[in-house]
Image (cartoon, rainbow, N blue to C red):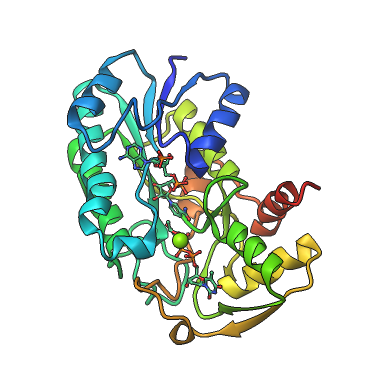
Amino acid sequence: MRPILVTGGTGQVGTALRQLGSRFGVEIVAPGREELDLTSPASIEAAIGSREWSAVLNCAAYTAVDKAESDAEGAYAVNAVAPELLALATGARGLRLLQVSTDYVFDGSKSDFYIEDDPVAPLGVYGASKEAGERGVRGANPDHIILRTAWVVSPWGHNFVKTMLRLGAERKQLRVVADQRGCPTSAIDIADALLTIATERGPAGTYHFVNAGEASWCELARFVFDRAGMDVDVEAITTDDYPTPAKRPANSRLSTDKLQATFGIRPRPWQDAVGEVVDTLMGA
Ligand SMILES: NC(=O)C1=CN([C@@H]2O[C@H](COP(=O)(O)OP(=O)(O)OC[C@H]3O[C@@H](n4cnc5c(N)ncnc54)[C@H](OP(=O)(O)O)[C@@H]3O)[C@@H](O)[C@H]2O)C=CC1
Ligand SMILES: Cc1cn([C@H]2C[C@H](O)[C@@H](COP(=O)(O)OP(=O)(O)O[C@H]3O[C@@H](C)C(=O)[C@@H](O)[C@H]3O)O2)c(=O)[nH]c1=O
Ligand SMILES: [Mg+2]
């Protein structure tokens, strides 16, 4: 199999992909930002034209949700413009593009888990820019996979689990929102799903992948401290009690039925996946 070109290889999902590639018998080529700058169309053309790829996997993104509210230009450059350029460059060569997207494309008003065809209505700039990226990919390369995931945690980069462990080491009491529900998901499990899809070459389209189950941020925080054996009191608060620049969906739970039916991928419970991450971070 030809190598896979991965963008965002220093991020959470990109790091997991670099670790898992060999298990799938595929070479992962992940140039850094200095080599492949997604805000540069020439840089994108050069990277995709440099070798024969089996697919291109876009894991790069502007993921600072609150910062995006005051930097829409920066967020759209990476999350909307770049994916369309990647789609044009891959489409012209008959290459498949796998684009990672987010639960924050939804507004959270649904009472059930979101399916792929539910209407999108992002609440903030990050979600809107990612949704624009989805449309750019669909419009420019019919051979695409858009994989929406959520609440990504890993031992690498920035994520909620690492934030909680850092804050919990500083104070014995934390306040965490309990009225936003979603699906915590390990970057390793996302990478596994992406490589399964990339190597099996199933039908193009939009899919959801998250670990099984659901939680609020508060429940997730309590799970993390319990698993880490840390005595931290987590007070359940409401979104109104914790003002942030970006509005976040109250419900962004994703259904993975379509992915399971199409690719036979069975996500494990988030407690197993997040537990593994906590164990790694605690050196257990
Ligand atoms: N984190 C989460 O909770 C969630 C993430 N997602 C999506 O999953 C995907 C992966 O996210 P995650 O791994 O957490 O992201 P990270 O924030 O951990 O990593 C982002 C990556 O993008 C790279 N990048 C940013 N801007 C550029 C640029 N201009 N040119 C080249 N590279 C750039 C970063 O490089 P550098 O190291 O140089 O900054 C880094 O490698 C993204 O599409 C994200 O939207 C979806 C749902 C939840
Ligand atoms: C640190 C902290 C956060 N919170 C709240 C704020 C927010 O509502 C929620 C989560 O905060 P974070 O900023 O860690 O998470 P956030 O940046 O919103 O995470 C999102 O990132 C992007 C990239 C995605 O695509 C989403 O799927 C999602 O993972 O927890 C507390 O209530 N107490 C706290 O002490
Ligand atoms: Mg954040």
Q: Position of residue 237 (x, y in %)?
A: 56, 85
Q: Position of residue 8 (x, y in %)?
A: 41, 37
Q: Position of residue 83 (x, y in %)?
A: 26, 40
Q: Is residue 115 left or right of residue 164?
A: left
Which of the pair 70/17 is nearer the observer? 70
Q: Is residue 158 above or below residue 111?
A: above
Q: At 21% across and 40% down in the image, what residue appears?
A: 84
Q: Is residue 253 left or right of residue 77?
A: right
Q: At 50% across and 54% down in the image, what residue appears?
A: 257
Q: Is residue 265 above or below residue 28?
A: below
Which of the pair 145/36 is nearer the observer? 36
Q: At 62% across and 25% down in the image, what residue appears?
A: 23
Q: Is residue 271 visible?
A: yes
Q: Position of residue 67 (x, y in %)?
A: 34, 62
Which of the pair 257/182 is nearer the observer? 182
> Looking at the image, how many numbered discs can be counted on the residues?
0
Q: At 72% across and 76% down in the image, what residue appears?
A: 172
Ligand 1, image quadrant it occupies: top left
Give the residue furthest to the front.
170
Q: Is residue 149 left or right of residue 40?
A: right
Which of the pair 112/132 is nearer the observer? 132
Specify the quadrant of the image occupied by residue 41.
top left
Q: Is residue 141 visible?
A: no
Q: Is residue 28 above or below residue 145?
A: above
Specify the quadrant of the image occupied by residue 29.
top left
